[in-house]
Image (cartoon, grey):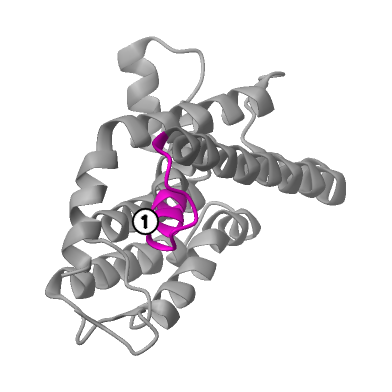
Amino acid sequence: MRFSLTGEFVTSAPKPLHWLLIAATLAVLTWSGLAPYDRATWWMEVAPALIALPLLVATYRRFPLTDLLYCLIALHAVVLMVGGAYTYARVPFGFDLQHWLHLQRNPYDRIGHFMQGFVPALAAREILLRGGHVTGKRMLGFLCLCVVMAISAWYELIEWGAAVALGQGADEFLGTQGDAWDTQSDMLMAMIGGAAALLLLARWQDQQIARLRR
């Protein structure tokens, strides 16, 4: 790792870990797309991963992220791809959780929205810290949660748009499973995910950011 003349990070060659993450993510993407339950739903569910991967590759040399964040982004992508393959309401692991926890519905959708807060919170935190945009810890945490809630709100608006445009054809994408409060529950899970990430991983992320600067 070194600095360019403009003070930006420039990485030399991808780490083996990064190659492994790319290979694993592409493998899951291939599996997910072979025979999904509903092809239109698959496209909508995996779209964030399909958008993020080229962006991460394009910015890798100029602004490499911490290994922690790369791993979490890959994990989030896998969650999306599994949900796309089965649809969130039909993911087998979700049925197992439903049975173990005696729930009324498949909770895999909640896992997806938890990750929708968990990973963006740390991504926002890393960008704000490394760009020197925020220095106060309290304001940093507040803004990261604001980013999480903004992303969650936009996603719910997209779901609403899909429901209006596709009618019943959007049921698999929405995955409400008859829950009238699904939108509010999804946003709550995103907020909980973001707060959990900041509380549990902020110090670890700081250590990795410090190593990037060496």
Position in image of residue 93 (x %, y %): 34, 34
Please count the marks in the image. 1
> Seen from this angle, which residue lies furthest bottom?
5
Among the 4 quarters of the image, the one containing residue 150: top right
Instruction: Place residue 2 in its image quadrant.
Output: bottom left
Q: Left or right: 170 with respect to 140?
A: right
Residue plotted at (35% across, 80% down): 7
Residue 26 seen from this side: yes
- Residue 75, relative to residue 18: is it above or below? above
User: Does 19 appear above or below 41?
Assistant: below
Q: Which residues are magenta?
A: 123-137
Q: Name the one closer to the observer, 64 or 47.
A: 64
Image coordinates of residue 167 in percent, x first then y, are 83, 43
Task: Give the main secondary structure, helix, strand or loop, of the magenta stretch.
Answer: helix
SS class, disc 1: helix
197 in relation to 75, above or below: above
Quadrant where the N terminus lies? bottom left
Image quarter where the C terminus lies is: bottom left
Residue 186: image location, x then y, percent? 58, 29
Residue 135 falls inside the magenta stretch: yes
- Judging by the rendered image, the residue that carries numbered circle 1 is 73
- Determine crowd level at label 1: few under 14, some 14-19, many 20+ residues with C-alpha closer than 10 A: many
Of all residues shown, which one is farthest toward the right?
164
Image height of 10 relative to 77, above or below: below
Q: Residue at x 60, y 37 (%)?
A: 149
**Residue 209 on the magenta segment:** no
Q: Quadrant of residue 179?
A: top right
Kindly identify the amino acid type of the residue bearing the numbered disc 1: Ile
Residue drawn at (59%, 62%), measured in percent from left and top? 43
